[in-house]
Image (tube, rainbow, N blue to C red):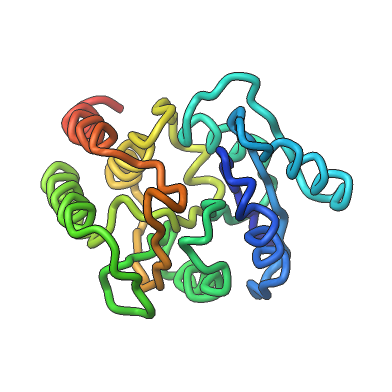
Amino acid sequence: MKLSVVIPVYNEAATLEKLVAKVAGVDAGVDKEIVLVDDCSEDGTRDVMKKLETAHPDWKFAYHEVNQGKGAALRTGFQAATGDLIIIQDADMEYDPHEYPRLLQPILDGHADVVYGSRFLGGGPHRVVYYWHYLGNKFLTTLSNMMTNINLTDMEVCYKVFKKDVLQGLALKENRFGFEVEITAKVARGPWVIYEVPISYYGRSYAEGKKITWKDGFRAIWCIFKYRFVS
């Protein structure tokens, strides 16, 4: 059994090396490969990536020559991944790789095909940050649940784990943060069993590099209705 950790990267020069060191060092209970995709960063991230590529020839690296968005970077990473299981890992240190065993367990136990982390199930430390972001996440998750008839508590969470055959059965199209809505709708429509597990959340502020904005929220609403009907 092998886990592919797919890391989309955009302007994360300040955190990338620290993050991948944590990913490499964690014992997930299975073999692990690291797949990094730089989405045309402009802050020196690509130099960090090249340094890592020299130091770790066994890892996988991909580079977009034009910025396309998180969804596009993830599609590139999924195509390169060879693991039986695939987990999404942001490069910004908001999520702790030491929680991989908890996220993998429902799949390894034979209960789940897909596992979502949840920042709202009370599983660990949770940084106090933006109230309106919290409210927005709750609203989007509720609206998504109404369209998909599933009862997630945190649709927009980074940590999502998939059996590889699940991703191979999905035609993903969204390039940016609409990816979270799209993949949730398409997984919910399929025959797969979905579980949630509680995770910690070390959120960051906009001054620290947070990227998602209110515009992404409006796109998410559009995608929730779009993928209710579009496969």
Return the residue nearer the eye: 118 or 96.
Answer: 96
Return the residue nearer the eye: 221 or 128.
Answer: 128
Q: In which quarter of the image is residue 143?
A: top left
Q: In this view, does 16 lie to the left or right of 184?
A: right
Q: In this view, does 126 lie above or below 41?
A: below
Q: Is residue 72 left or right of residue 181?
A: right
Give the percent coordinates (x, y) of residue 231. Answer: 30, 27
Which residue is drawn at the image coordinates 62% and 52% (left, top)?
Answer: 14
> Which residue is most to the front?
207
Residue 139 visible from this viewpoint = yes
Return the residue nearer the eye: 220 or 185.
Answer: 220
> Which residue is most to the top?
66
Q: Number of callouts in the render? A: 0
Give the percent coordinates (x, y) of residue 172. Answer: 43, 30
Which residue is drawn at the image coordinates 51% and 29% (left, top)?
Answer: 72
Q: Quadrant of residue 48?
A: top right
Residue 88 visible from this viewpoint = no
Q: In this view, does 190 lie to the left or right of 11?
A: left
Return the residue nearer the eye: 7 or 193.
Answer: 7
Q: In which quarter of the image is the N terminus?
A: bottom right
Which residue is drawn at the image coordinates 28% and 35% (left, top)?
Answer: 216
Give the percent coordinates (x, y) of residue 104. Answer: 52, 68
Which residue is drawn at the image coordinates 44% and 35% (left, top)?
Answer: 170
Give the percent coordinates (x, y) of residue 224. Answer: 20, 35
Q: In this view, does 39 lie above or below 140?
A: above
Q: Is residue 226 left or right of residue 182?
A: left
